[in-house]
Amino acid sequence: MIITAKIAPSLLAADFSQLREQLQQIENADYLHLDVMDGSYVPNMTFGPVVIEDLRDFSELPFDTHLMIENPEDFIEDFAEAGSDIITFHEEAALHSHRVLQQIKNEGCRAGISLNPHTPLANIKYLMPELDMILIMSVNPGFGGQSFIPVMREKISAARDMIERHNSSAELAVDGGIKLDNVDEIVDAGADVIVAGSAIFGKENPAEAVSRFKNRV
Ligand SMILES: O=C(CO)[C@H](O)[C@H](O)COP(=O)(O)O
């Protein structure tokens, strides 16, 4: 029996000239992962709340917004009003992570925190009661198409243990370098949500790629 995980295609790898069509091609996914980059926290830029608001009309999927930006506390309201269902920010980018989690919840969204590959899980120990999602970066954030950092398997297992120990209902998401040939070991290590960009939008048939990830064939 295979353990199932939710699949969250990352829009970063989509054809931005055809976003509406691309969204229609991944309706069989569980979340739409939206990578927001500001060119400062990470060395790349993508899109902001205006684009997310326009996309909201063309997808029924829960919007899983991943903020890779400085000062996330200044933009929570904008991304919530744009139609995000889950908002995740980086622990390393926020001065007061606990307060930002409260801000997200006050906007009616699920609250997530992301950790860069080098950031210890201990940094979020006292945030556990507030977390709806933990997003482990398995590449250095900023670009799609990078290779999964192997030692992140150990971190995913440790995060799973931490979730169990705290009786937490947080979903464990993993982002970066996930392909059909390594997804098994990532799910077996404890991931609930698989974020994949190039392995889904980089394919000719994204719907088929989603279903292959779900069935892992
Ligand atoms: O957050 C990201 C990069 O910062 C992307 O979501 C992630 O890298 C997914 O892309 P790929 O599956 O192509 O590695």
Image: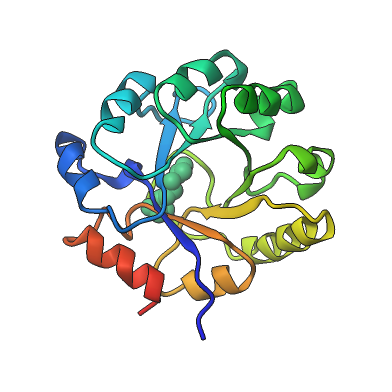
| Residue 49 in the figure: left or right of residue 209 | right
Please determine whether, in this image, residue 37 is positioned above or below residue 136: above
The residue sitting at 30% across, 46% down in the picture is: 13
Picture coordinates of residue 190, whole percent (x, y): 64, 67
Q: Is residue 138 visible?
A: no
| Residue 72 in the figure: left or right of residue 201 | right
Picture coordinates of residue 90, whole percent (x, y): 62, 34
Quarter of the figure that contains the C terminus: bottom left
The residue sitting at 57% across, 61% down in the picture is: 192
Pick whichever, 153 or 49, lies toward us.
49
Please determine whether, in this image, residue 30 is positioned above or below residue 208: above
| Residue 181 in the figure: left or right of residue 112 | left
Residue 51, image quadrant: top left
The residue sitting at 51% across, 31% down in the picture is: 67
Pick whichever, 82 or 119, lies toward us.
82
Spot the residue most to the top. 74
Number of marks drawn: 0
